[in-house]
Amino acid sequence: MLADRRQSASRGVGALFSMMRWAIHYGLHTDLTDIVIGVHPRHADFYIRCYGFEKFAPPTSYALVRNNPVVLLRLRLLEALAKPELPRGLADARDNPLPGSAFSHRFAFEPEQLRGSLIAGLLKARYCIDPGQQIEPAAGQRSMALQA
């Protein structure tokens, strides 16, 4: 959807705003302070203008995107939402809240749920993570089950 190369991008903008709204509210409901995304440098100004992201690192090429350049952008979520004037996309997220119940049990997977699944195979093969083992949080940190 986001890599759609049709001449009119307007069809995908609504879907993008909706997806970002979900990401922003997921961040708020899980007490995240920052959202970091990687985008093609050509698209960075859109996220800066519409959401208030800031450049976080210089562009780098990544093999996963055919060695195309990717620039990391960071949104300091709580700071950005506290501003009196919000960029269009961030204002849309603020004005269209999602309840915490929209996220309950949506993204967290318990180890027993992952055993033998395709996700478990990917985690093991690509990242050397055994999802069958419980991850203990460091002292003073919140526990977040394996995220997908």
Image (cartoon, rainbow, N blue to C red):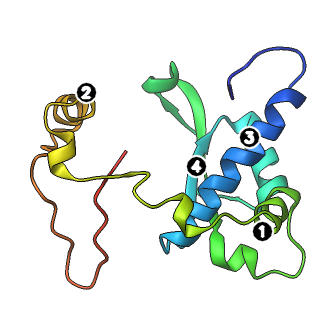
Residue 83: image location, x then y, percent: 81, 80
Q: What mark, if any, has residue 16 been given in the picture?
A: 3
Residue 111: image location, x then y, percent: 17, 50
Distance (Cα) linking label 1 and label 4: 19 Å
Q: Residue at x 56, y 59 (%)?
A: 102
The residue tagged 1 is 94
- How crowded is the residue under tag 3: few (<14 C-alpha within 10 Å), some, or many (20+)? some
- How crowded is the residue under tag 1: few (<14 C-alpha within 10 Å), some, or many (20+)? some
- How crowded is the residue under tag 4: few (<14 C-alpha within 10 Å), some, or many (20+)? some
Disc 4 or 2, which lies upstream in sequence? 4
Q: What mark, if any, has residue 28 been given in the picture?
A: none
- Residue 89 vs 39, above or below: the answer is below
User: Observer-nearest residue: 8 or 63?
Assistant: 8
Looking at the figure, which quarter contains the N terminus?
A: top right
- Residue 35 vs 122, above or below: the answer is below
Identity, as a three-letter code, of the amino acid under mark 1: Arg
Look at the numbered disc 1 and give the secondary structure of its residue: helix
Compared across the picture, whether 75 is left or right of 108 comes to right
Identity, as a three-letter code, of the amino acid under mark 4: Ile
Compared across the picture, whether 98 is left or right of 66 comes to right
Identity, as a three-letter code, of the amino acid under mark 3: Leu
Look at the numbered disc 4 and give the secondary structure of its residue: strand
User: Mark 3, mark 4: which one is toward the viewer?
Assistant: 3
Q: What mark, if any, has residue 118 been given in the picture?
A: 2
Distance (Cα) linking label 2 and label 1: 36 Å
Compared across the picture, whether 41 is left or right of 63 comes to right
